[in-house]
């Protein structure tokens, strides 16, 4: 069992630094801290989706599993040279994506974010995921980052897009489609 937090504030960050999981102190605005902060924000958006009372059980189970994986990913980013996300983690996400996508009609137009409130929140989570991915890539340009973590975030944004489509389809809603203004 890991350490238990008995006191939430420590005052150690009052100087503009924060502690990584390996004990190293870094500036709060470092790319590493920014990267795991973005992953934490993504995890929070999934929590928002999971708070919906009309969430389908298959989506809830999937997002709960992903929240735990994102917590692992955040820990991985917080402790340099640590690997938690594996190729199997990415493959599992791809299988889940394929399963949801198999239930959908072929995509012929660009989809606008929207539809049901849960689908709209999935689109929001997708954009937060893309931002987290960009931030982790910025970190990877300067420091070692597990390549599977980068792949995981890329697949997760795709999965969140497919989930939004799946949720709208299951609800019997037409997807909001982009209409080019000429």
Image: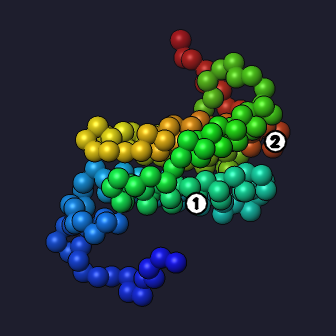
For the point 28% across and 50% down, which residue is it? 31
**Image side of residue 74 versus residue 88, left or right:** left
For the point 31% across and 53% down, which residue is it? 32
* On screen, residue 179 above or below 156: above
For the point 51% across and 50% down, which residue is it? 85
The reply to whether callout 2 and callout 1 are in contact (CB within 8 Å) is no
Instruction: Indicate the position of residue 16 as horizontal and vertical percent values.
Output: 19, 67
**Circle 2: element type:** helix
Name the quadrant containing residue 30: bottom left
Measure how far apart labels 2 and 1 are at the Cα level: 26 Å
**Image side of residue 57 versus residue 131, left or right:** right
In this view of the protein, which residue sits in the foreground, 1 or 181? 1
In the picture of the structure, the residue carrying the numbered disc 2 is 170
Instruction: Indicate the position of residue 172 as horizontal and vertical percent values.
Output: 83, 39
Which is more N-terminal, label 1 or label 2? 1
Instruction: Indicate the position of residue 80 as horizontal and vertical percent values.
Output: 33, 55
In this view of the protein, which residue sits in the foreground, 49 or 136? 136
In the picture of the structure, the residue carrying the numbered disc 1 is 68
Q: Can I make out residue 160 in this image?
A: no
In this view of the protein, which residue sits in the foreground, 165 or 151? 151
Q: Which residue lies furthest to the left in this view?
A: 15
**Circle 1: element type:** helix
* On screen, residue 4 above or below 134: below
Q: Can I make out residue 97 in this image?
A: yes
Instruction: Indicate the position of residue 28 as horizontal and vertical percent values.
Output: 25, 61
Question: Residue 173: which disc?
Answer: none
Q: Mark 2 or 1, which is nearer the eye? A: 1
Name the quadrant containing residue 144: top left
In this view of the protein, which residue sits in the foreground, 118 or 62? 62
* On screen, residue 19 above or below 80: below
């Amino acid at each position: 069992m890991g350490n238990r937090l008995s006191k939430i504030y420590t005052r150690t960050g009052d100087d503009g630094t924060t502690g990584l999981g390996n004990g190293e102190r870094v500036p709060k605005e470092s790319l590493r801290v920014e990267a795991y902060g973005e992953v934490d924000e993504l995890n929070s958006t999934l929590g928002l989706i999971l708070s919906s009372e009309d969430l389908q059980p298959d989506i809830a189970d999937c997002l709960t599993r992903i929240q735990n994986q994102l917590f692992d990913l955040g820990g991985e980013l917080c402790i340099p040279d640590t690997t938690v996300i594996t190729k199997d983690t990415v493959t599992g996400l791809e299988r889940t994506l394929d399963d949801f996508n198999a239930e959908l009609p072929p995509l012929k137009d660009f989809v606008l974010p929207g539809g049901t409130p849960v689908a709209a929140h999935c689109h929001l989570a997708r954009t937060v995921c893309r931002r987290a991915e960009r931030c982790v890539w910025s970190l990877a340009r300067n420091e070692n980052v597990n390549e599977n973590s980068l792949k995981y975030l890329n697949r997760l944004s795709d999965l969140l897009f497919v989930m939004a489509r799946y949720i709208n389809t299951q609800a019997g809603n037409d997807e909001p489609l982009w209409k080019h203004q000429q």
